[in-house]
Image (cartoon, coloured by chain):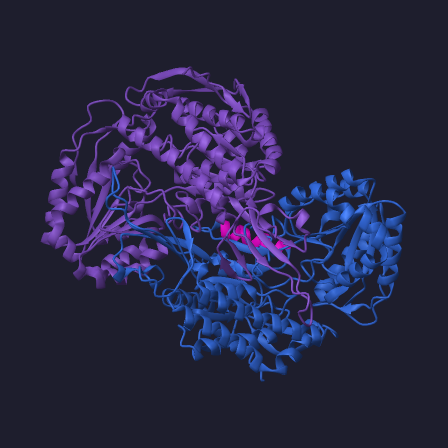
Chain colours: A purple, B blue
Amino acid sequence: MQLTGNLLIGQQSVPGSNGSIKAVNASTGAAIEPAFGGATLADLDRACALAWTAFDVYRETAPEARAAFLETIAQNILDIGDDLIERCMIESGLPRARLEGERGRTVGQLRMFADVVRNGDFLGVRIDPAQPERKPLPRVDLRLRHIGVGPVAVFGASNFPLAFSVAGGDTASALAAGCPVIVKAHSAHPGTAELVGRAVQKAVKDCGMPEGTFSLLFDSGRDVGQGLVADYRIKAAGFTGSRGGGTALMKIAAARAEPIPVYAEMSSINPVLLFPNALKNRAESIAKAFVSSLVLGAGQFCTNPGLLLAVDGPDLDKFIKAASAALNETAAQTMLTPGICKTYQSAVARAAEHTGVTTAARGVEAKGDNQGQSALFVTTADAFRKSHDLQEEIFGASSLVVRCPDLATMLALIESLEGQLTSALHIDEADYADARSFLPALERRTGRLLVNGFGTGVEVGHAMVHGGPFPSTADGRSTSVGSLAINRFLRPVSYQDLPDALLPDALKTENPLGLNRRIDGKLQLAK
Amino acid sequence: MQLTGNLLIGQQSVPGSNGSIKAVNASTGAAIEPAFGGATLADLDRACALAWTAFDVYRETAPEARAAFLETIAQNILDIGDDLIERCMIESGLPRARLEGERGRTVGQLRMFADVVRNGDFLGVRIDPAQPERKPLPRVDLRLRHIGVGPVAVFGASNFPLAFSVAGGDTASALAAGCPVIVKAHSAHPGTAELVGRAVQKAVKDCGMPEGTFSLLFDSGRDVGQGLVADYRIKAAGFTGSRGGGTALMKIAAARAEPIPVYAEMSSINPVLLFPNALKNRAESIAKAFVSSLVLGAGQFCTNPGLLLAVDGPDLDKFIKAASAALNETAAQTMLTPGICKTYQSAVARAAEHTGVTTAARGVEAKGDNQGQSALFVTTADAFRKSHDLQEEIFGASSLVVRCPDLATMLALIESLEGQLTSALHIDEADYADARSFLPALERRTGRLLVNGFGTGVEVGHAMVHGGPFPSTADGRSTSVGSLAINRFLRPVSYQDLPDALLPDALKTENPLGLNRRIDGKLQLAK
């Protein structure tokens, strides 16, 4: 499939004239064709105007129509075929199997949200029927549903060029909520972005959705991204990336005449806690699983285990020895971009030179350009407590083991940590009592707690939380993965004494959409 | 009941030493005893430390215990008896019947949240059971519940000294969510605040809740309020008041090392739309009802009808004539504070002198100090469009009628309005088609749409939205009235592969709390 390098503004394919970007072959560092023209502010304005016009129509599309639209996007992505995987492999350096899996996840997410739309529970329908006889005053008829917040800006993520990019989780949940989407493509995979963008653009047409339901913009600098979040027609933003990038967008959003929410997923070191009995009984098997998780995808996961805490002693020595042996054999892997690789290498070098930090192991040395060599460091509780910079995320396959004198110190260190996406406890039954005493501190700063596993597997389901207190995300009241992610783009509206003729279908007395409803506070299932 | 003038920090009653405030008799302007000592930053720190310590215990209290606590607060407020009403009448200038009604609402809100806690749906339990046989990878067990965000700062509102103050909607919903609360008392009703604060403090003790579950602070300036929102242990804030005050808190919250949500309810002019047939058939009865709503509580409601739009012509003349006649007879009413009254009088004087604005009617002239004389102004669509300041809320019994040349202009003016708490449509059946074309624009900027009524009655129920896009509130994704208000103070946490022994009761397989649960995405009612 031929790439055009064009912006997708509604149903148009338009050359961008504000500078240009080219993708880089992640393995070789060579620029690859074609050039993608950056959007001008006029292009941005047109995309926003189209999205604004589309909003009222799109948000009132019938559930079946909106669900079919999401499913059509999924099918159109599959229909691109292997061209998508091949282009994405070159741009991201990620291997085929991973990207095929990620495509499956992307398509699965879209289909899950189609089911969510059909199910209709996301509308949160509540009806408090009128009580004309109530004393001293009659009660009015009140009905509540949720509607989309408005057009949403989505920023593609470098580390999930399919599942958290143009038609990824943010886009799928915003579209499901009834919000038009304008995507700012990530400069690391513009070709992948165009291919997927065209699949969405075609679905808009195939399904007769309003033109402005979707646009895709390339940005040769930062003006388009910042301009999007600042535009008065944009009512929320979804972002996955660096802490610097995310907090910059949060500032722009807060400074608007009308502040808007930014759902930025930014930074997490995902502490792993080894409890004494598990460590004693399973040091070696945990070590192997830990290293597998650490090096997965060259460590470029938001949920990568960047910190490990355990009580010092021979069992921990055994763990470190086994983990080091496993890590020594891990091959260097191509990273997403030369910039990310360079940042990783400097961060690892800084950690290695850090007072109080020793290098336990390094992976096999890099043979090619842009490859990340994995790293395992060890430090003491004292050194960790004194150096806040040891808490900073190193994006890549690097982790830090902290030798704690006892469990109380381990808990105190947990209390010193910032917000996290995940926290993992490795425990045997004899550890349950100790683990229980850690739960409150972990719940307060973590979106997902897990036992005897690692956070790198992120199941896309209904009970998933991929989110957590700042700075792991901008807004710990939300998740960006799983069906609950739709809530980010909804707001409640109440209707008082409207005649049935004027009520939206979701609130009509006869319940034509067959929705579960909360009547006078009590949930009632449809039929 | 003797007032102490003391701060309530946990179970302590402590004299504040950082300056002091006295209440003012709203009718006479005279300062009244006792003096209330302002909190020092050390007092603030102690309240925050206690709240922080209380959080882990309080948030895990059993539903029945927490519900009983909320009910005990309600009962303790009733047990104060008439002392509360009398003190509140003096401090607020509001009449007895209104305050008795407001006490009923306050108590009703607490009891409603007790029911919400017992019901347990607010926990939003979701379970995606493990699928050990799934290919290619087994599926983990994932369970989700919501927990409180952490200690919450609540700012008492001047215009609801009971229902939106110390034990009002923000406090009730935060406590229901499992969050300790620190209230910054409003300086307009410190005596009322102390009485209610002691009722809450006693309930904490009566019910064996952790000491830091509740504190009440007085502020002789702005340091305590601002310090509360800035404190790292505070995780959300609830505020009802001016746009200036609310946006100042939003700025403080956004600038923290860990930004937090501020739920500020600030500013709304609540447009009333008269459609042609309703106007033709019912001009006079609508006019009477409009004036009744306008002057209710001296117009000091967030949902006061401050703007009325209709198509110009003889029917509108008839409406204005009837409304003017009714308004002419409305007595001047004591306002909440001399400051509020002065601001009201200047705003009304400015409106009267505004180019393009004519004064249609004034109420009976004020006879005492601190009384607000109601006002009705008329302008043209042109003048309204040109003067953004005519959109600014005048807090008090003042409203502006805009003569529109046609419905299209009326809709265009709606599109120029900022976010609103309520919008009211007055329609007969023959107006339905026209009204329908207004709904999208109204939904986009309003929390509650209502037909043939006025927004001033705010039913406390499950389907109420008292909230709307900025600047009506800081965060249009929420409501501050009704059971949905609890969502403001919750965040989701996911638990992966935890043994039953470590799961919170809400997520245990046997469902010991008897909760409705979403299993694999499908709602299942308990029993």
For residue A145: magenta?
no
Main SS class of the magenta portion in the image: helix
Can residue A353 be seen here? no
Q: Say above or below: B329 vs B75.
A: above
Which residue reaches farthest front? A527
Q: Residue B222 in the image: x percent, y percent?
A: 57, 62
Can residue A30 be seen here? yes
- Image-quadrant location for residue A196: top left
Between residue B39 and residue A153, name the one nearer to us: A153
Q: Say above or below: A64 vs A189.
A: below
For residue B253: magenta?
yes
- Image-quadrant location for residue A74: top left
**Looking at the image, which residue is at 24% across and 44% down?**
B133
B103 displayed left or right of B136:
right
**Looking at the image, which residue is at 65% across and 78% down?**
B85
Q: Classify the position of the C terminus of chain B by image quarter.
A: bottom left
